Image: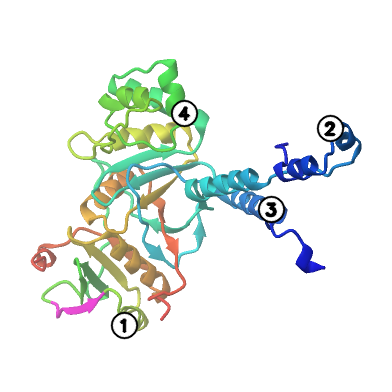
């Protein structure tokens, strides 16, 4: 323990010597300051080096790829039962069917997307949503679309390559 | 009597409770957190309302940074040694014991095989090695990593940990690589958010 200078000073003034002091029962003064420093250092280390337990995940299913020799077995889907979502960088362009459709634009964050999907799902039996991300699309927007899709009740969707018609939409 | 008190006595603060509190906080953090995998770049995962928990074991993680660098890693330390030797054999690169040891302690890595030896040697040395990501185009090494990882651990599940701002083409390549190997079911790591467009 570090000598308590004040007490030594006081003792000197009063003329007390070592022997007298040894007999007196002294309480131990532990200086806690370094201990606190240590504790906070450890704390800071753990705060910076770790992360709260595992972040959540979203499951995604993609169709299996056909082997080279096997024929590509594509289940034909009626045009009228499809709904395409072309994911551009800042917005989604959606349309029904394949040939010469009427296109609509909608922003990613708009809640209307869920309504549009739910409505389409309600009035079309066996709706298939085709998600076509363009190369300028950002991953988080794709995740958002998949997330909204999971709430809309749409049972069948697939991630496919954009068609020529879709590619024309890229700025 | 208070007036006669020696005004030279300095106030003494009792630090005991402060230490107790600090250790309580340390214990809390020690119990509830796991070490963050060290990555050359911070990956900001996109938000979603999905609540599926990532599996704790038998997990392979493919990490993608926003400029398209791809990293790969599996969770089991013991499997990693086997994985590295197998991929090395397939690509004509061999590793010595200490390199295998270093790899088994590496949670995730992203270097082309020809630079792997150098990377492993540098890992605990103070030299910072620039990881450039696993090649996807031309000779897709990711394909070999995934295939061998599944051979080492047949019940492996895949999680894609990509930055929200990554452009689609890289994601597409990773998806395609997985599809080619018959992996049709995997997880996208997202952050649970309260405020949600989907639910509004």
Q: Which secondary structure lies at badge 4? A: helix
Residue extent of the magenta highlight: A101-107
Categorize mark 1 by other alpha carbons within 10 Å: few (<14), some (14-19), many (20+): some
Q: Which residue is identified by label 1?
A: A112
Q: CA distance from mark 3 to mark 2?
A: 30 Å
Numbered disc 4: what chain? B
Which structural element holds mark 2?
helix
**What residue would you read off at disc 3?**
B15
Q: Mark 3 and mark 1: span between their CA atoms?
A: 58 Å
For image coordinates 63% across by 52% down, the residue present is B22
Q: Residues within 10 Å of mark 3 (few under 14, many from 20)?
A: some
- Specify which label sits upstream in the sequence, 1 or 2: 2
User: B130 or B153, which is in the foreground?
Assistant: B130
Residue lying at 74% horizontally and 43% vertically, measured from the top left: A9
Q: Which disc, if any, is residue B104?
A: 4
Q: Are marks 4 and 2 on the same chain?
A: no
Q: Which residue is mark 2?
A: A18
* Chain designation of label 2: A
> Does residue A99 appear left or right of residue A112 in this picture?
left
CA distance separating discs 1 and 2: 87 Å
**Is residue A98 or residue B63 the one in the foreground?**
B63
Q: Nearer the viewer, mark 1 or mark 2?
A: 2
* Above or below, B7 relative to B105: below
Alpha-carbon neighbours of circle 4 within 10 Å: few (<14), some, or many (≥20)? many
How far separated are the C-alphas under marks 4 and 2? 62 Å
Position of residue B132 relative to residue A78, above or below, is: above
Give the spatial CA distance, label 3 vs label 4: 43 Å
């Amino acid at each position: 323990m570090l000598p308590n200078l004040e007490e030594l000073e006081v003792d000197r003034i009063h003329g007390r010597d070592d022997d007298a002091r040894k007999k007196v029962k002294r309480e131990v003064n532990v200086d806690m300051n370094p201990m606190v420093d240590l504790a906070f250092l450890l704390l800071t280390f753990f705060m910076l080096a770790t992360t709260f337990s595992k972040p959540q995940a979203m499951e995604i299913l993609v169709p299996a790829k056909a082997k080279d020799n096997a024929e590509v077995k594509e289940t034909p889907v009626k045009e009228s039962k499809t709904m395409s979502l072309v994911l551009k960088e800042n917005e989604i362009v959606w349309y029904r069917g394949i040939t010469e459709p009427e296109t609509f634009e909608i922003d990613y964050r708009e809640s209307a997307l869920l309504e549009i999907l739910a409505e389409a799902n309600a009035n079309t039996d066996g709706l298939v949503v085709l998600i076509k991300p363009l190369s300028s699309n950002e991953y988080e927007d794709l995740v958002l679309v998949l997330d909204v899709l999971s709430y809309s009740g749409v049972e069948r969707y697939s991630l496919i390559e954009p068609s020529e018609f879709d590619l024309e939409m890229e700025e | 009597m208070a007036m006669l008190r020696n005004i030279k006595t300095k106030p003494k603060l009792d630090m005991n409770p402060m230490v107790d509190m600090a250790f309580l906080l340390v214990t809390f953090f020690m119990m509830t957190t796991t070490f963050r995998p060290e990555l050359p770049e911070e990956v900001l995962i996109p938000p979603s309302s999905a609540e599926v928990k990532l599996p704790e074991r038998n997990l392979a993680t493919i990490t993608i940074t926003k400029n398209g660098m791809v990293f790969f890693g599996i969770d089991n330390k013991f499997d990693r040694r086997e994985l590295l030797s197998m991929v090395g054999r397939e690509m004509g690169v061999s590793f010595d014991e200490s390199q295998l040891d270093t790899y088994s302690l590496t949670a995730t890595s992203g270097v082309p095989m020809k630079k792997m030896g150098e990377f492993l040697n540098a890992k605990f040395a103070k030299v910072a090695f620039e990881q450039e990501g696993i090649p996807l185009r031309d000779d897709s090494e990711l394909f070999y990593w995934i295939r061998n990882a599944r051979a080492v651990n047949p019940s492996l599940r895949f999680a894609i940990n990509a930055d929200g701002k990554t452009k689609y083409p890289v994601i597409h390549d990773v998806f395609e690589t997985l599809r080619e190997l018959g992996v049709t079911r995997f997880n996208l790591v997202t952050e649970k958010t309260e405020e949600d467009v989907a639910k509004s």
